[in-house]
Amino acid sequence: MTVSSDIMNAPDIKTALPGPKAKAIIERDARFVSPSYTRDYPFVIARGEGAVVEDVDGNRFIDCAAGIAVNSTGVSHPEVVRAIVEQAQKFIHMSGTDFYYEPQVRLAEDLARLVPIDGQVRSFFGNSGTEATEAALKLARYHTKRQAAIAFLGAFHGRSLGSLALTASKAVQRRGFSPFMPGVYHAPYPDTYRFNGSADACAEVCLSYIRDQLFVHLVAPDEVAAIVVEPIQGEGGYIVPPTAFLQGLRDIASQHGIVLVVDEVQSGMGRTGRMFASEHFGLKADVVNIAKGIASGLPLGVTCAKAEMMAWPPGAHASTFGGNPVACAAANATIRLLKEGLVANAAAVGEHLLGGLRELQQKHPLVGDVRGKGLMIGMELVRDPTTKERAVEERGALVQAMFRRGVLVLGAGKNAVRLAPPLVLTKAQADSVLGIIDEALAEVTRLAH
């Protein structure tokens, strides 16, 4: 899709949504595809460029979802496509669990230099975020010879049975699948917007729950293998915790010999204006989980860990397709693009977008809170700014209103909207998005009254 820069700054809706071609594909999908998927609106992609996507009926949208924060370099970045094609022409698969190939080694070397882990680092390669979580759980158990784990309310770490035991985002994700992996305990995650007190006090309440409740009444610390935490909670509402909370978790883990697993699946790879969100908080992990944006859309999940921890023997854990050479080539190209300017762009455009959203917050009482880092931004909707009553239905209406106007967004938590565009988003495109959010908020407010 080759379009002029001025057209790329604004959406172009040519048909009623969904258009006839989109309707036909959706009808076929309804007959043959699992109904477990969650589709908020009828968007059927045909192609895209940068942060602009086009549906099968020729309607163009600014993409602020990025395939759920996956398309970090935009839609089919030419340098990523080139890397994919060049590798595919050499060999598509060889299985890094049984053989060797240089793209996987090069990626492991780059990640060892980048991840927020002190000392030498080794990486295990899988295909997704949930696989990275599973590997981290197995590694923590193997290393500590313990079984229990601590996760947080609102967390999302995947849907396979081990990671699902950690996930506590929505009941529907767990309903009907129990019993889960035993020995998982959930603690509150600090939401400073909804806490009546300072950020540090909010952090201390959550930390003291672990020290004074979990460790006293439910599980001894010397039985806990891992604490698994998102440095910015994603699916739970794009909640940014106080630094004191994450540093406090680091202290608890170090004190008791617990492995601190930091889930950077959604927040990592430049999304927050740093290569990893942990860097905003000075947080050092024992294990870092990566997926989503690392390979610009190709399936890849990575579990990075301190080398002395990742000392399990051959055969202890493996993945036939994990670290696929084509995905590794895409990841190597992605990392180069991130370092050459996209991380900096995420910081600059993210600051611009956050500022514009905070101006809209002053104009629209429906917006209770605006928060985030870089291009990982949450906007929480409330029916009353004083009581902070969650505007759940209004959130859904806002997502739909923005879709009709040509901007793709997704919800997060019960009543927040997440803005997670490709890291190539321009300030001009951000301004177009702000204008559409302004119009959509006005419509939703009018209809609600």
Image (cartoon, helix red, strand yellow):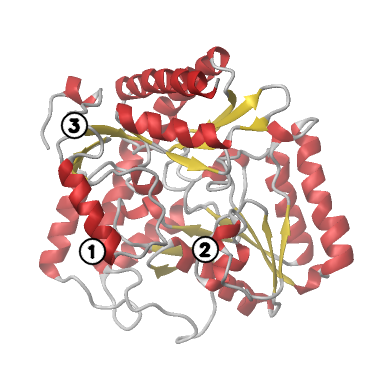
Please give left or right for residue 210 compared with residue 56 in the image.
Answer: right
Please say whether residue 305 is visible from this viewpoint: yes
Which residue is denoted by mark 2 in the rendering? 120
Badge 2: how crowded within 10 Å, few (<14), some, or many (20+)?
few
Q: Are marks 2 and 3 in contact (CB under 8 Å)?
A: no
> Which circle, 1 or 2, is nearer the viewer?
1
Which residue is denoted by mark 1 in the rendering? 326
Q: Amino acid at mark 1?
A: Val
Q: Which residue occupies 57% across, 23% down?
A: 366
Badge 1: how crowded within 10 Å, few (<14), some, or many (20+)?
many
Which residue is denoted by mark 3 in the rendering? 15
Mark 1 vs 2, N-terminal side: 2
Vertical relation: 8 (above or below) 227: above
Q: Amino acid at mark 2?
A: Gln
Which of 174 and 91 lies nearest the eye of the viewer?
A: 174
Q: Position of residue 34 (x, y in %)?
A: 35, 65
> Which circle, 2 or 3, is nearer the viewer?
3
Q: Quadrant of the N terminus?
A: top left
Q: Which residue occupies 20% across, 41% down?
A: 55
Q: Position of residue 135 (x, y in %)?
A: 51, 72
Q: What is the secondary structure assignment of the residue under circle 1?
A: helix
Q: What is the secondary structure assignment of the residue under circle 3?
A: loop
Please give left or right for residue 225 compared with residue 418 in the image.
Answer: right
Q: Amino acid at mark 3?
A: Thr
Vertical relation: 15 (above or below) 46: above
Mark 1 vs 3, N-terminal side: 3
Mark 2 vs 3, N-terminal side: 3
Badge 3: how crowded within 10 Å, few (<14), some, or many (20+)?
few
